């Protein structure tokens, strides 16, 4: 499981590092602290953790393993040669695991990355490097390697603390119980019967079903009539398939 069950606070655990990319990419040469030969991934991580200035480490699978320790990675570029580098960033703190990294990136973070307005969402660990890798692949139009996605945010971030307070709803509700239905900060609540988005809708438990505001004597808003949407993007059926697959070019249209 991506979230260890340690018996302590749920979804608050320690992570030493996260993979950022894998492929013919590399950080700026000026950030190199040391280069070690014949060293694999595990030993390279240990070397980085023992070096106070090391914030990133890169493992080259060719030539029996090359370990490069780095104190920064502000720029990611294509090496232009057939080589496979795997870059890791040091986290070494308590974190909260993002539920669905791929969906979060495709639906929210990449749109925020390309937007003129900064997002109000908390930044994940290593987000600058993850965005740089993603932007490189979009700019070149080539996907020779792979870029990781945001997986963790700091466990002490207010958004993480609030999220971990959520508990599953009870199996049964008493008649007359109410729930307030709304969307996250990145979405707006739409009803099939309203022209404009709403902040929230109150649903009441009546005769074993959830009913919203009455529409007439025999109809009312139901959960099936509600949806959360972040934006409207018009395109062909093929565009929809590409968007669901997380293809970067859809965001450049």
Image (cartoon, grey):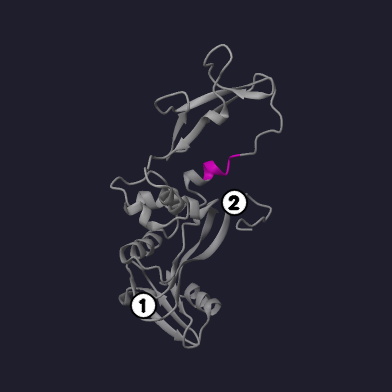
Residue appearing at x 60%, y 58% in the figure: 2
Image coords of residue 51 (percent x, y): 45, 75
Q: Residue furthest top?
A: 217
Q: Give 23 or 44, whichever is nearer the viewer.
A: 23
Judged from this view, the residue extending furthest toward the left is: 116
**Above or below 116: residue 55:** below
Residue drawn at the location 45% of the way across and 57% of the way down: 125
Quarter the N terminus occupies = bottom right
Place of residue 248 in the rendered image (x, y in percent of width and height, measured from the top left): 39, 57
Element under label 1? strand
Which secondary structure, mark 2?
loop
The span picked out in magenta is 161-166
Among the two numbered marks 1 and 2 on one chain, the one whose residue lies closer to the N terminus: 2
Up the image or down, 56 lies above or below 2; here it is below
Q: Is residue 228 visible?
A: yes
Q: Quadrant of residue 137?
A: bottom left
Q: From mark 1 to mark 2, how far is it between C-alphas? A: 34 Å
Name the disc covering residue 11, or none. 2
Circle 1: is it few (<14), some (14-19), or many (20+) Cα within 10 Å?
Answer: some
Provide the residue designation for mark 1: 32
Residue 63: % across, % down: 47, 88
């Amino acid at each position: 499981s991506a979230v260890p069950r340690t018996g302590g606070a749920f979804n608050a655990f320690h992570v030493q590092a996260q993979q950022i990319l894998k492929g013919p990419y590399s950080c700026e040469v000026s950030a190199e602290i040391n280069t070690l030969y014949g060293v694999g991934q595990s030993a390279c991580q240990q070397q980085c953790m023992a070096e106070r200035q090391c914030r990133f480490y890169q493992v080259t699978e060719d030539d029996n393993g090359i370990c490069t320790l780095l104190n920064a990675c502000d720029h990611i570029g294509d090496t232009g040669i057939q080589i496979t580098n795997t870059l890791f960033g040091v986290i070494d703190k308590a974190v909260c695991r993002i539920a669905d990294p791929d969906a979060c990136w495709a639906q929210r973070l990449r749109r925020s990355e390309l937007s003129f307005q900064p997002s109000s969402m908390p930044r994940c660990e290593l987000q600058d490097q993850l965005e740089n890798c993603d932007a490189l692949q979009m700019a070149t139009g080539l996907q020779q390697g792979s870029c990781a996605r945001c997986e963790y945010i700091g466990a002490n971030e207010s958004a993480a603390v609030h999220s971990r307070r959520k508990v599953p709803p009870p199996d049964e509700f008493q008649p007359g119980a109410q729930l307030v239905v709304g969307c996250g900060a990145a979405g707006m609540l739409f009803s099939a019967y309203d022209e404009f988005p709403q902040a929230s809708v109150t649903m009441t438990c009546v005769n074993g079903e959830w009913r919203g505001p009455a529409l007439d004597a025999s109809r009312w808003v139901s959960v099936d009539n509600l949806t959360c949407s972040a934006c409207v993007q018009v395109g062909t059926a093929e565009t929809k398939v590409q968007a669901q697959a997380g293809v970067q070019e859809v965001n450049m249209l």
